[in-house]
């Protein structure tokens, strides 16, 4: 049987800002389904890599294939079409402040589907219910807590029912309970939707709880230093820095 | 022959400063031209598909830039009419030309001061607000979110603002013109003792339809300048609170500068056609 095409494939990618190279000669592939986390120390280029994967920045060299099509060489029109095929949730939620939650979630439906208004409202309410925000239709983003905003951002990213979802630091700035709730929600959505999740984070608890695979970036080598199941890497990685990173340098609370 | 080290260095530094200043202006102009081109394509697309215009946002900005600006426009323009009335009354009295105060005030208001004062008010109110709003959206990753949703930020954010400004600024200008001429009338009646009906008849005779339309054309051009500069500055704002503040300030300074340049160019062309 022919092997399924990876949902994301990165080939010899070199990225950075101005003259400064942040990551070089990066190659990896992410298969459909499951949760893949991208982690690494501060300033290693996690978020920069994410912004390249979603087509916001142009790499110095190399290619990024999303669902078999290059987002690097795509024309602006093709890129717009490709972008509708995946959802992105941002650190702060990135909800539009002038729109209510319902309007935020309805926006992609309004722009890219032929749904009638009642159908759009029903679909947006369903997505809000999925992230446990039913009843908050008419709230503005400024009236919500950080965790709720992130969930609302997730509802908007789910609006067009994409097969691929990118998360930028979903747990950042959340208390442990809210963060755990969000992790549970991601696991639930993975089971329910069967989508692929690519999460940029360095919250170790979250990674061990939800990730099937993790790619660890290192700013010294400017590349991937470890790739695999995070629990296995924590115990068995041959790289002492990776082991130390995943074990918080052996500084963990124990009773 | 080489110059002494410190003079040499100072000269080099100054030349570099001038060079980078000119380079910044040129780069800014190029970016502005590219942005205007992008906006033109979006406007063309909106003309072909008017249903894609975000009507609710357009109405919101019409309210924000138009309705909310009426009190300040009335106050500034009536005072402008009074000031012009005073200045012209003092000069005209010397030559017994009191009656010409109506011609002078109404023409200056309709052709020049009305569009210009409304443009200054809109720069301070709307232009800086556009820059701050888009700049804040940039900081909050909302612009990235728009792009990754496959939405064009220019269509989504700039078009409603441009349409609103193109619709309300000429209306505000008409409003400003009327109250400005009324301001002049207060002085004509109270200081020169001119009958209201005489002032009214002379003012309506002085303002030709062409002069009125050319004044409105100015306000269209100014609306375009304010929106383009405000939005462009918002998109290029730094990713922090200071960056947003700088974008708002820079909008006011640049917009005033380009409005005055545009006013000069338009007035020059108008004078060539005898207006």
Image (tube, grey):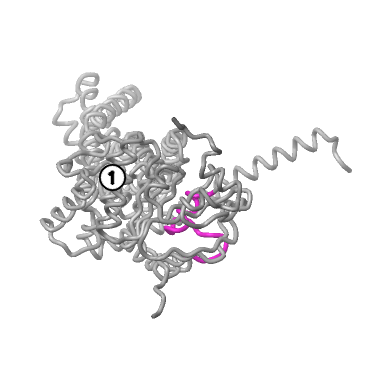
In the picture as drawn, the residue positioned furthest to the front comes out as A255
**In the rendered structure, does residue A63 fall within the stretch colored magenta?**
yes
Q: Is residue A60 visible from the viewing direction of this image? A: yes
Residue A172 quadrant: top left
Give me the residue at 19% from left, 39% from top: A139
The percent position of residue A129, horizontal first and vertical second, equals 18, 48
Query: What segment carries the magenta color?
Result: A45-64
**Disc 1: which residue:** A151
Give me the residue at 21% from left, 50% from top: A130
Report crowding for label 1: few under 14, some 14 to 19, many 20 or more residues within 10 A (C-alpha).
Answer: many
| Front residue of B25 and A170 | A170
Looking at the image, residue A46 sits to the left or right of residue B22; the answer is left
Q: Is residue B30 visible from the viewing direction of this image? A: no
The percent position of residue B67, horizontal first and vertical second, equals 20, 36
The percent position of residue B100, horizontal first and vertical second, equals 27, 32
Q: Considering the image in quadrants, where does the N terminus of chain B appear?
A: top right
Looking at the image, residue B229 sits to the left or right of residue B57; the answer is right
| Mark 1 residue element | helix
The percent position of residue B20, horizontal first and vertical second, equals 62, 44
In the picture as drawn, the residue positioned furthest to the left comes out as A118
Number of numbered discs visible in the structure rendering: 1
| Front residue of B37 and B217 | B37
Looking at the image, residue A178 sits to the left or right of residue B4; the answer is left
Looking at the image, residue B81 sits to the left or right of residue A58; the answer is left
Q: Does B253 sit above or below residue B262?
A: above
Say which chain tag 1 marks.
A
């Amino acid at each position: 049987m022919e092997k399924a095409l990876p949902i994301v494939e990165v080939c010899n990618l070199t990225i950075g800002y101005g003259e400064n190279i942040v990551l070089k000669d990066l190659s990896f592939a992410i298969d459909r389904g499951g949760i893949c986390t991208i982690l690494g120390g501060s300033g290693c280029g996690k978020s920069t890599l994410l912004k390249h994967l979603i087509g916001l920045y142009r790499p110095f060299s190399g290619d990024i294939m999303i669902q078999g099509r290059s987002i690097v060489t795509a024309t602006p029109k093709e890129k717009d079409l490709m972008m509708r095929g995946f959802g992105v949730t941002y650190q702060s939620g990135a909800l539009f402040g002038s729109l209510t939650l319902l309007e935020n979630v309805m926006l992609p439906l309004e722009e890219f589907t032929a749904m009638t208004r009642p159908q759009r409202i029903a679909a947006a309410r369903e997505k809000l219910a999925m992230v446990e925000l039913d009843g908050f239709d008419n709230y503005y983003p400024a009236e919500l807590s950080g965790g709720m905003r992130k969930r609302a951002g997730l509802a908007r990213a789910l609006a067009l029912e994409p097969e691929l979802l990118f998360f930028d630091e979903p747990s950042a700035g959340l208390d442990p309970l809210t963060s755990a709730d969000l992790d549970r929600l991601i696991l639930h959505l993975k089971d329910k939707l069967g989508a692929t999740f690519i999460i940029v984070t360095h919250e170790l608890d979250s990674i061990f709880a939800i990730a099937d695979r993790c790619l660890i970036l290192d700013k010294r080598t400017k590349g991937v230093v470890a790739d695999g199941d995070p629990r296995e890497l924590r115990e068995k990685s041959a790289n002492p820095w990776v082991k130390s990173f995943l074990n918080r340098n052996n500084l963990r609370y124990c009773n | 022959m080489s110059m002494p080290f410190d003079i040499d260095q100072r000269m080099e530094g100054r030349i570099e400063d001038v060079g980078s200043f000119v380079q910044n202006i040129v780069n800014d102009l190029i970016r502005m031209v590219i942005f205007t081109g992008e906006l033109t394509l979006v406007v063309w697309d909106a003309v072909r598909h008017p249903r894609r215009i975000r009507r609710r946002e357009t109405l919101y900005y019409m309210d924000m830039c138009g309705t909310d600006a009426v009190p300040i426009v009335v106050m500034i323009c009536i005072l402008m009419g009074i000031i012009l009335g005073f200045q012209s009354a003092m000069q005209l009295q010397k030559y017994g030309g009191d009656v010409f105060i109506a011609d002078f005030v109404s023409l200056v208001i309709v052709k020049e001061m009305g569009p210009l004062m409304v443009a200054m008010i809109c720069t301070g109110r709307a232009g800086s607000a556009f820059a701050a709003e888009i700049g804040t959206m940039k900081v909050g990753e909302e612009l990235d979110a728009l792009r990754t949703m496959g939405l064009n930020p220019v269509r989504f954010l700039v078009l409603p603002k441009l349409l609103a400004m193109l619709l309300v600024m000429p209306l505000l200008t008409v409003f400003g013109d009327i109250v400005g001429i009324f301001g002049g009338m207060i002085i004509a009646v109270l200081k020169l003792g001119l009958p209201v009906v005489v002032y009214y008849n002379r003012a309506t005779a002085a303002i030709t339809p062409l002069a009125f339309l050319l004044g409105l054309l100015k306000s269209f051009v100014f609306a375009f300048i304010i929106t383009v500069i405000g939005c462009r500055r918002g998109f290029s704002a730094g990713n922090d609170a200071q960056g947003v503040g700088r974008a708002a300030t820079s909008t006011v300074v640049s917009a005033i500068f380009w409005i005055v340049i545009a006013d000069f160019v338009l007035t020059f062309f108008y004078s060539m056609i005898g207006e």
